[in-house]
Image (cartoon, rainbow, N blue to C red):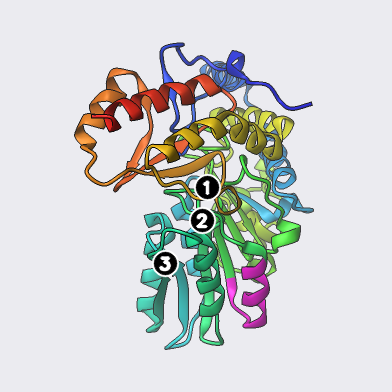
Amino acid sequence: MAIQHQKHLFNLPEEITYLNTASQSPSFKAIYNAGLEALKQKDRPYTITGPDYFEPVIALKKLFATLVDADDFNRVATIPSVSYGMATVANNVKLNAGDEILLIEEQFPSNYYSWQKLADKYQATIKTITAPNVTTDKVKLWNEAILEAITDQTAMVAMGNIHWSNGSLFDLKAIRKKSKQHQALLIIDGSQSVGALPFSVKEIQPDALICAGYKWLFGPYGCAYAYYGAYFDHGTPIEENWANRLNSENFAGLTNYQSEYKPLANRYCAGESGSFIYVKMQIEALKQVIDWTPKAIQEYCKAISTEAIIELKAFGCEIETDDYRTHHLFGIKLPEGLDLNVLKSALKAQHIFVSFRGNYIRISCHLFNTSDDFTKLVNCLTSVLAK
């Protein structure tokens, strides 16, 4: 049975049409209540015990590992941001002069700056694969160009599962196969896909997967997740967090300084990532996302947006075909000559929240949305287009 809308779990006012989860997810009631309970614990710090620093974090790592189909939760690090996770990767990668780091056109800055700095450090080259300037088969041809660009010079491929601004879907399975043939690392930014689009670490086998936690994973702003593969098992963290060392649970023995880290990715957890407030909220968020399942979320988003997409295309908007984009996040290229200021004013007046990316509108929906939200969006757009 297909999943039904979940508006009852959220506190969004009826007059609000929120199609902007890709920027910031709303909270649902269980997360809100978990945060309140955590605040009460902070209000009474004498109730915080030693295990409270560790056991909830382990539970959280297990949930994220389940979500991305990873066997060992010890390969998951809890971190504050995507930039932190990417910096950890850059801190543990050595290149040769002339090596290439392959990127996709207009990646999000957190998945660019670390690689530019790394390339400068080793006199390597950033190789950017741009989207073909065509109106048909754009993403299909883009994927082909990415695969063709991976050569013996490629040391790393760093990209998203999808393009963050328009939902273009990249063939990570084929890209992983080609990158392995050339012994290149694959570093994935899953911020705009994991949680709303099925993803399997077992299937893709990335060297690292970094995800912001405040979008499709419904955590608070300031939380993120990282999965690190075998390449990083013995790497160097960018900070020395006491909780990441062996036997750190023994508070009485903390000054018996320990030279060994906890196994695998545990060494990369950020200091104070055991936040009593954040972790409790994150746990409730991931439990719910796993219960919904990314597959069901994707199918639901497709169901509520299909008719609207047909109507918008009829008015001259360009939207990528179903096979080469996601349904929870997609771009609408507006017709030439449309006054964006008029459109923005109309959207604001009708309490419709979307993102603008150049001449594109980025739409990002979830289970709190319904087909009525898309009807409202279409009516607003077509009223401006008709002028």
Q: Nearer the viewer, mark 3 or mark 2?
A: 3
Task: Find the distance from the CA under tag 1 to the CA under tag 2.
Answer: 12 Å
Please state which of residues 110 and 231 is positioned toward the viewer in this rendering: 110
Name which residue lies at 44% across and 48% down. Answer: 166
Query: Is 332 included in the stretch rendered in magenta?
Result: no
Residue at the spot of label 2:
85
Which comes sooner in the sequence, label 1 or label 3?
Answer: 3
Please state which of residues 288 and 325 is positioned toward the viewer in this rendering: 325
Q: Residue type at mark 2: give it.
A: Gly
Task: Find the distance from the CA under tag 1 to the CA under tag 3.
Answer: 24 Å
Badge 2 marks a residue whose secondary structure is helix
Q: Looking at the image, is 343 positioned above or below residue 320?
A: above
Q: Residue type at mark 3: give it.
A: Pro
Find residue 31 and report its horizontal and vertical position in percent: 58, 23
Name which residue lies at 64% across and 55% down. Answer: 227
Which quadrant of the figure has residue 151? bottom right
Q: Residues within 10 Å of mark 2 (few under 14, many from 20)?
A: many
Segment tinted magenta in the rendering: 174-185
Q: Nearer the viewer, mark 1 or mark 2?
A: 1
**Dominant secondary-structure state across the stretch colored magenta:** helix
